[in-house]
Every structure is written in structure tokens, then in C-alpha cells.
Amino acid sequence: MSEIASINDFKLLNIKCKKYFDLFSKGAAFQNLPENEKLKERFGFYLFMLESLCNEKDLDRISDIITDTEYNAHLSNRRSNDQGIDAIYIDDDKKEIMLFNFKFRESFKVGQMQSSNEVFVSTKLINCILNGHTDGLEGKLKELVGNAVKKLNSNDVWKITLYVISNEAIPIDIDETAIQQLKDFYDMEVESICLPKIKAIMSIRPNPIKAELIIDNDALMSYSESTISTSKSYIVRLNAADIIRITCKNSEVRNNYNCERIESLSKEKIDYGVLFDNVRGFVQRSKYNEAIAKSLKEEPNKFFMYNNGMTIVARDIKATQVNGNKKVRITIDDFQVLNGGQTLRTLHNFNAQDEENITNYLSKSEVLVRIFNASNSDAVNKIAEYTNSQNAISNVDLKSLSTLQIQLEQILDEHDIIYSRKNGDTGMNDNKNYRYKISMEQFGQILFAIQGNPEKSSNQKQHIFGKYYDEIFSEKNFNVSEAPSIIENYFEVKKAYDTESDSLQKIEQKVFYILYMKKIRPDLEYHQCIKELERILREFEPTKESITDARKMIQVRFKEFLNSELC
């Protein structure tokens, strides 16, 4: 049974969505700014959910994939039929075409369920994509559908997933006969996301979580940094049922190390607070999760050998010898699961599938768990970064845990700027009126551009937090104290572009070039830089064949031509 959502969850989501819209609207040029508060919450709902599910932190890019009729009417004063699909995102890494159908309720009703009709409303556009037709489509929708058709016609294997998203309390049953037939007919997945799942996504700093364990001496190894250190960490062989217990929502159960009725744990749900600092964030589906669940059921006794284990950090660890020194009682206070979040989620999901799983399988499985005493926040960041570096996690997510990136977040917070290190960030202080929000990736691209690489800032952004990171964020090339003014300049350029003629193609790559031009020609005003860039783009024709501005700007020859024109 899924977790129950309350009216307070509904209200918290509305507050978060309104904050998202307010932050985005400060840097975006809405032709008709919505006056209705509920409409602002609805548009913010799109932005928040798409950021979370598409793993895309740049709100401008997210806005570009929103096809909703009402949203685009307010944004660009152009009204075109969305054909039942409110957003389309093409994930080139996962080879997935993600279609989104949103329903935003203005009031909360207990027991209100998502309508399965929303799935069928979307089939008109799904037919267009599968049949390769864009006739009758307009605006963004036509371009996005055209891109999706190209992907399906390529030699790569692509999958289509329809996400039915609402702020209602109860999800639709995606296994019901009609929807199952629809999934089979279109060869697509259908995912239902509503308030209970959104609760898990929402980034709200949890209260400190505490738990107690009893460990056999032969299942435990202690570690300290030096022989005179009183601060110890532990490596333990922990029963999977115990992991369920210490990470559940019930504080009494977490601290009941002598739980005699193990079957009672079948009703316990995960406390997502233990995963707040986990680098992976919210993972909707994963092939690794399926493999974990399979090994649990087929070979529970060998799970210890098949699984990579978990890493826990705690602000305080107390260990006491008990039972004639045959066992150790360990208390972990204010702890987080930094590595092994997928394992933890899968254990809880497996536990919820059948009330007998806790006794038949989980109680027979063990996991290697490292419990580090990390009262020092810098140590926590390094443990999180290094223990995750062996897994398939993006460089951006890894670097989000570094001391420098956390310092940047704190510095920019003092200037009322949100530095988004993770999906769902709406600032360190819920009561503060922030001026801007910028993602780590955007900031990295800006730095890369003004340091002399505007031609690489877009098409090589995946390397900014990889092979270029140490150079870009080095003390030689980057003064941390300049970060607020750099970001303010970025938004000033965006606003300057918005006031220019509608005939100009406004792409972020141009903003990176303007910031670069301003760095080498500080005498030019931003509006002058814009005019110069547009002129140089028109004059630069490297081949007889006409190419787009975006393709021109990734060429070194274009940057060299621009430099010769400016100097």
C-alpha cells in the first residue's frame, strides 16, 4: 500500500512551486505575467517536477520543453494547442523520450485519485510521434515532436515513457486492464507520480535521525585515524532486516535494538530523511534496483557477496561492550546514508511487496555497512565524494559534495542567490526572498566562457566538472568572492537580450559569448555586445552551405574571427 499524503503535504508543495515560479520569473521575460497565485503555483509545479524527473537543473532549458498551452500563452503570448502533452524531454543518455501529462488541482481532497482519462488524452500526440507526423502541430510542440521522430527513426533503440503527474493524493492503477492494453499497443511505459511520491522528492532538511544496533564481535571491525584518537568508525556485517529497522520512520523501532518480532518490520516505511545528503537524489527506476531485488529473492544467503554495501556517516557514534563483551551496542546519532541509497530503497521496496519477505529473505541477507564518525562537515563531503566515485554518477553530482561548491552555495546565499547543487534546491533559508537561482552546471559554463572558452561552454559542458574542473575552479583562474557579480552579469545579459528585437534568436550560447566579449572589451555596453555578436554571426560564413548560429559558435574559427573583429 502506498504512503498516505496529507493536506499539509499539499500545502508544502504549493509553497515550493510558488517559490520556483517566483525565482524563474525574475530571470525570464513573461509577456503576460500571471496574476492568479494558483496559476503561478501550477507553472512552478511544471518547473519543479521536470527539474526533478529529467535531472536538469537549468530552468531555462526546462521552460523550453514545456508545451502546455496556457504556459506558453503567458510566456510568449503565443497560444497553440498542446494536444494533451504538457512537456517533452529527450534523454540522449538513457535513450528515452519522456512525455509529461500534468494535472494541477487547486484544492486538496482526501482520497482524490488521478484520472486514468489523462493517459488516453495523450494518445493523440503519441500517435503523431509513432507515425512520424508533425502536420497540424505548432510552436515548440512541433519542433520537439520532430526531434522525437528523428530519434525513433535512427538506428538506436529508444523507449517512450508517459509520465502522468498530479498533486492528487492517490495514483492511478497503471496495471489496470485498459492502461495495460494501451502500454502494449504503443509499446511504451506509463509512470504515475502524485503527492505521496512527490513527498519523497521534496527537498526539506530532516530532523536528526538516531538509531541503535547490537552487533556480534565477529561481525564488527573498528577503525580510528590514530592510536590516540577517541573517535572511532566501524565496518559491520549487518542483517538486512536490521537495515530496514534503523532507517524506518518509527523512532521507537529504530531504537529497539532487541526487536523480537521481526515480522512486525514488514509494515515499516523508509524515512527519506536518511537519504537527504545522498548524491543520487530521487531515482524513479533503475536496472540496478531490479538486479538487487532479484538477488535478494533468489540467493539471499549470498547477497553480502553480490552487493557493494552502504556507507553511513553519523555526527556521533557511541559503542558499549555488552553481554560479557561478546556483543557491542552501537548508537548512531544524526546519521545519513551517503552511498548505497539504491540498495536501501530496494530493500524497503522489497519489504513492502510481501509481508513474508522480511522473514523469508531479508532476515537471511547481510550487507557490508561502513559507519563513519564524521562530526567534521568537510570530512563528510569528502567521504561522500570518494565513496561514490567508483559508481556511475555524473561528475557534476560528485563535485556537488566538494568543499568549494558548498562554500559557493553559502557565499551566494548571503547575496540572496540560490546556487543549486542538487535537484529541488530552493535555498538554504525558506524565509528568504531570493533574487536568482542558478545551477552548478550553468555557473561552470559561465566561468569556462569568460575564462576564454565560449566555443566549448555548450558542447563540452560534460567535461567542465570533469577534466577541466581543476583549471576552471582553480584559485589562479577563479576568485570565489567574484561569484555574485558574475551571476548578476549573467542575468543582466539575459534581460538585455529579452529587450532586444523579437527577431533575434535567443539561445544561451549567445549569453556565454556576450560575457566573454565583455571580459575582453569592458568598454562595450551589453546592448553593444549583442549588436556586435549578431553582426559577426551574420558575416561569418565558413562554408558555402548555410549553418545555424549554434553550429557557428562551437567553432574555434568563429571565436578567432570574433576576436579579430573586436580587437
Image (cartoon, rainbow, N blue to C red):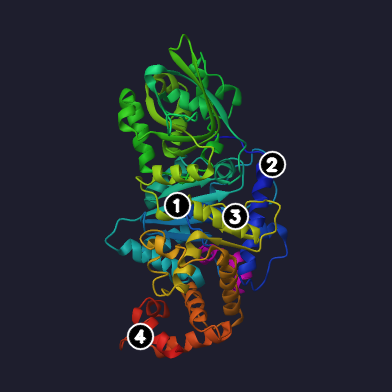
* Kind of residue sitting beneath label 1: Asp
Q: Is residue 105 visible?
A: no
SS for callout 3: helix
Residue in the picture at 53% in, 36% down = 274
Q: Residues within 10 Å of mark 3 (few under 14, many from 20)?
A: some
* Kind of residue sitting beneath label 4: Ser
Whole-percent x, y for residue 2 in the image: 54, 34
Residue in the picture at 33% in, 30% down = 295
**In the image as oriented, which residue stretches furthest toward the left?**
155
Q: Residues within 10 Å of mark 1 (few under 14, many from 20)?
A: many
Query: What number of labels is visible?
Result: 4
Start-end of magenta stretch: 59-79
Residue in the picture at 45% in, 47% down = 190
Instruction: Measure how far apart labels 2 and 1 are at the Cα level.
Output: 30 Å
Q: Is residue 73 magenta?
A: yes
- Residue highlighted by disc 4: 546
Instruction: Measure how far apart labels 1 and 3 are at the Cα level.
Output: 18 Å
The reply to whether dot 1 and dot 3 touch (C-beta < 8 Å) is no
In the drawing, what numbered circle is on residue 397?
1
Q: Is residue 424 above or below residue 61?
A: above
SS for callout 2: helix
**In-front residue for pair 364/125:** 364
Whole-percent x, y for residue 339 in the image: 43, 39
- Residue highlighted by disc 3: 410
State which mark lies toward you, 1 or 3.
Answer: 3
Whole-percent x, y for residue 227 in the image: 42, 29
- Residue highlighted by disc 2: 8
Instruction: Measure how far apart labels 2 and 4 are at the Cα level.
Output: 56 Å
SS for callout 4: loop
Query: Which of marks 4 and 2 precedes in the sequence?
Result: 2
Instruction: Measure how far apart labels 2 and 3 are at the Cα level.
Output: 29 Å
Query: Which of marks 1 and 2 precedes in the sequence?
Result: 2
